[in-house]
Image (cartoon, grey):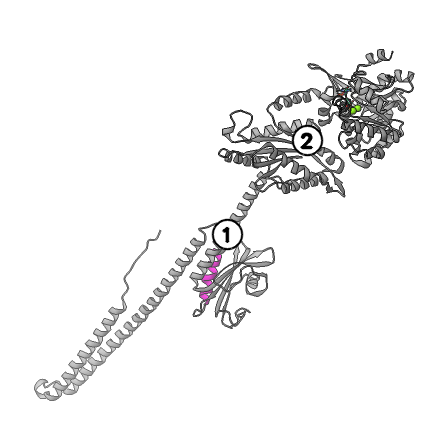
């Protein structure tokens, strides 16, 4: 590699000294020659030898002078040339120094603008460097926005308006962006077709395009201070600076995009895509925070686990898009229904969780659940119809670690969540729209249900399911006029289980329609011989809401009737009020189709749920079954002598039922008192342990004789 070399060059002062010496010598020579001429003239005869004539002396002197003059002129020419070379060199050195300074400034500016990756910082450093480098009055930067727009994103100084927009191709910056050529404008002078925009604008201005890898990023502009007039050289320097600025800008934009992607990824990892609510991970983190804050305070936190009732039905009947819309609308209502300090999260599907921070009693947590129910009381408009949804809510209350010693309350979010989940399971087993607050004893119950659930799967195939029959009596004569078919499960370890202990579970896991199909076929098959003998004997069979939604129910029932030879007039399908109300029109259509087969319909458990007497008019039912809770109240009323709500309601149902020509059956008669009161009130039909318990077919046969 070639090393740096230094070499001496004559300097201007030495040349001046030489010149001075030359002229001094010339002067001396002149004096000598002049003196010689004078002496020769005055003392000619004395000084000169005889052979040397004055003429020869004069010629010699003249010759000497001419020779010396020639020498002096030659030297002068040499020295003059050297002087010019030296002056040129000095000018060159000065200009080189200034270039080096410029390059140094540009390098420093380049370094400065590449120091940061934050886009805002980079833009403002570019502007301040450009202003300093070019002694600018103000600078501005426009960045590309979309394909055809520039927006002023930042200014240093006062002239440009931040946020101003212009189309590419319009205005000075717009045209620089379009042509990708830097522009210098001095005074009113036109430059490459540009003209100073307004008389008030600065005398001198430059604009350069910011392009990186052939991608236009924007335009950088500088307006000179009053005294400064930019040159082509400045424009070149500004162009070089613009190239560096473009690199810094491109890096910052890339970094910004990566940061945005990273933050979006983080956001997506912690939020639910459909509703924008926090997801399980973020929610549990918030619960942990809330619990750790509670370590000092006496207040507690409540975790509400919310699960929509029958959401699958909405998805199945209206489609997944409508299901999503319901979820989104419900999420919005949940969000609106909570306080700012609380958190709502979606765990996926129809599961939501609410964190209520800083409660002092269970009642406050229940009030939060009430707020959710009041939000749900309004129907949700979706897919051109109004959907009503219910929700089950499990609540767990958590406190700080100091209160955790009893083991009942917990310090960890996952523990709290598990408790709320347990409470939710219990709430769901109680029916729809139920709220349950967690108690430690619930864990065993939920485990029991879990075992039951796994045992239930396959019970039908293993022939563990069977049907018992509970007689229905004419109350006045105690004559058996019919039976209700009630499903039973012969559990391998737990023995015979009544429907109440497992049918709700079977409903939740979607097994009930299959069970209903089995009960209908089994009942028809078993009772067919008996029914051939007793023409007025009726058989009541329970239909689950899900079975009622099945469009093929009518044809399937017809097939069973054909196969067993049972006359449909013997059959009464028992349906609960809520099942009838569900999905209004199509349910009504199916009920009418069932009736047109010749099967009668009974409204089961009347008085619970919606308890609207007007439903008796609206639905094509033949029989009403008064729920046993009213019959039970009838007993209490008689015992304590009060009038009794149940009695009044039974009277009203009987009046309306008889008025509409419906048969009325009282369920759950356990005492003679109840039976005689019902007879007094005019209720002719009844069923209950007093009269007969549900029994296998063999017992029924022997009972009927
Ligand atoms: P349900 O249709 O109201 O049936 C009457 C229930 O009350 C039966 O309970 C019966 O054993 C019980 N019961 C009858 N008399 C008395 C009494 O005097 N006192 C008391 N405390 N209870 C009495 P079970 O068999 O446990 O059935 C419970 C519910 O399960 C039924 O209520 C019905 O809704 C449902 N279910 C039963 N079998 C089926 C079925 O095959 N399909 C469907 N979908 N549901 C069924
Ligand atoms: Mg029933
Ligand atoms: Mg009932």
**Residue furthest out toward the front:** 641
Judge left or right: residue 448 versus residue 691: left
Q: Residue 317 or 523: which is nearer the viewer?
A: 523
Q: Residue 205 or 469: which is nearer the viewer?
A: 469
Residue 237 versus residue 695 in the image, above or below: below
Magenta region, main secondary structure:
helix
User: Helix, strand, or loop for circle 2?
Assistant: loop
| Residue 702 place in picture, x, y as percent | 84, 11
- Marks 1 and 2 sit apart, C-alpha to C-alpha, by 54 Å
Residue hosting label 1 = 119
**Mark 1 or mark 2, earlier in chain:** 1
Region of the chain picked out in magenta, as a range: 231-244
In the rendering, which numbered label is found on residue 503?
none
* Marks 1 & 2, CB-CB < 8 Å contact: no
**Residue furthest out toward the left:** 46
Residue 121 versus residue 384 in the image, above or below: below
Residue under the image location 58 percent in, 42 percent down: 340
| Residue 521 place in picture, x, y as percent | 83, 21
Q: Which quadrant of the view contains residue 231?
A: bottom left
Residue 696 versus residue 143 in the image, above or below: above
Q: Which quadrant of the view contains residue 597?
A: top right
Quadrant into which the C terminus falls: top right
Judge left or right: residue 142 versus residue 687: left
Residue under the image location 80 percent in, 22 percent down: 667
Q: State ligand 3's quadrant.
A: top right
Judge left or right: residue 117 versus residue 660: left
| Residue 290 place in picture, x, y as percent | 53, 36
| Residue 379 place in picture, x, y as percent | 73, 40
Q: Residue 149 or 479: which is nearer the viewer?
A: 479
User: Helix, strand, or loop for circle 1?
Assistant: helix
Residue 252 colored magenta? Answer: no
Residue hosting label 2 = 434
């Amino acid at each position: 590699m070639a090393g740096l070399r230094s070499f001496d060059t004559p300097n201007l002062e030495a040349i001046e000294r030489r010149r001075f010496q030359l002229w001094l010598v010339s002067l001396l020579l002149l004096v000598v020659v002049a003196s010689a001429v004078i002496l020769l003239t005055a003392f000619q005869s004395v000084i000169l030898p005889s052979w040397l004539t004055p003429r020869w002396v004069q010629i010699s002197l003249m010759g000497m002078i001419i020779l010396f003059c020639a020498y002096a002129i030659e030297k002068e020419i040499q020295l003059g040339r050297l002087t010019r070379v030296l002056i040129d060199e000095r000018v060159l050195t000065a200009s080189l120094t200034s270039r080096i300074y410029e390059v140094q400034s540009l390098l420093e500016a380049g370094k400065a603008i590449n120091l940061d990756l934050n886009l805002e910082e980079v833009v403002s450093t570019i502007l301040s460097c450009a202003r300093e480098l070019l002694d600018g009055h103000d600078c501005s930067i426009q960045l590309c926005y979309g394909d055809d727009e520039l927006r002023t994103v930042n200014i240093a100084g006062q002239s440009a308006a931040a946020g101003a927009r212009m189309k590419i191709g319009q205005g000075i910056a717009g045209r620089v962006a379009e042509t990708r050529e830097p522009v210098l404008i001095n005074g009113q002078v036109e430059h490459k077709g540009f003209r100073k925009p307004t008389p008030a604008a600065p005398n001198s201005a430059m604009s350069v395009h910011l392009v990186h890898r052939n991608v236009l990023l924007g335009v950088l502009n500088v307006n000179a201070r009053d005294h400064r007039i930019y040159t082509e050289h400045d424009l070149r320097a500004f162009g070089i600076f613009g190239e560096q600025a473009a690199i810094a800008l491109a890096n910052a934009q890339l970094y910004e995009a990566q940061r945005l992607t990273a933050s979006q990824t983080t956001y997506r990892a912690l939020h639910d895509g459909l509703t924008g609510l926090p997801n399980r991970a973020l929610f549990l983190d918030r619960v942990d925070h809330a619990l750790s804050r509670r370590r000092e305070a006496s207040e507690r936190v409540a975790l509400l686990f919310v699960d929509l009732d029958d959401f699958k039905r909405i998805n199945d009947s209206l489609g997944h898009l409508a299901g999503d819309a319901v979820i989104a609308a419900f999420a919005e209502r949940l969000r609106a229904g909570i306080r700012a300090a609380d958190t709502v999260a979606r765990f996926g599907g129809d599961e939501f969780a609410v964190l209520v921070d800083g409660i002092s009693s269970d009642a406050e947590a229940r009030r939060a659940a009430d707020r959710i129910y009041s939000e749900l009381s309004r129907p949700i408009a979706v897919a051109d119809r109004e959907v009503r949804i219910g929700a089950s809510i499990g609540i767990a209350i958590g406190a700080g670690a100091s209160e955790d010693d009893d083991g009942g309350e917990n310090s960890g979010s996952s523990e709290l969540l598990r408790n709320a989940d347990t409470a939710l399971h219990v709430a769901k087993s109680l029916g729809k729209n139920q709220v349950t607050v967690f108690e430690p004893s619930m864990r065993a119950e939920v485990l029991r249900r879990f075992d039951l659930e796994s045992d239930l799967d396959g019970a039908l195939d293993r022939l563990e399911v069977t049907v018992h029959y509970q007689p229905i009596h004419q109350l006045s004569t105690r004559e058996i006029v019919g039976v209700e078919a009630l499903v039973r499960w012969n559990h391998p370890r737990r023995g015979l289980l009544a429907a109440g202990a497992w049918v709700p579970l079977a409903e939740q896991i979607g097994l009930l329609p299959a069970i209903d199909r089995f009960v209908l076929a089994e009942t028809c098959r078993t009772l067919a011989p008996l029914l051939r003998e007793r023409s007025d004997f009726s058989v009541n069979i329970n239909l689950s809401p899900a079975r009622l939604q099945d469009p093929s129910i009518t044809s399937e029932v017809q097939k069973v009737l054909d196969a067993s030879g049972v006359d449909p007039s013997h059959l009464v399908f028992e349906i609960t009020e809520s099942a009838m109300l569900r999905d209004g029109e199509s349910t009504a259509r199916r009920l009418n189709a069932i009736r047109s087969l010749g099967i009668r319909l009974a409204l089961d458990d009347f008085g619970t749920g919606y308890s609207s007497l007007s439903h008796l008019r609206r639905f094509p039912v033949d029989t009403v079954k008064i729920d046993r809770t009213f019959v039970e109240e009838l007993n209490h009323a008689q015992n304590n002598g009060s009038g009794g709500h149940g009695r009044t309601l039974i009277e009203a149902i009987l009046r309306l039922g008889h008025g509409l020509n419906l048969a009325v059956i009282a369920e759950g008669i356990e005492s003679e008192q109840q039976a005689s009161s019902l007879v007094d009130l005019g209720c002719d039909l009844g069923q209950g342990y007093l009269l007969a318990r549900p029994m296998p077919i063999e017992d029924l046969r022997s009972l009927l004789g």
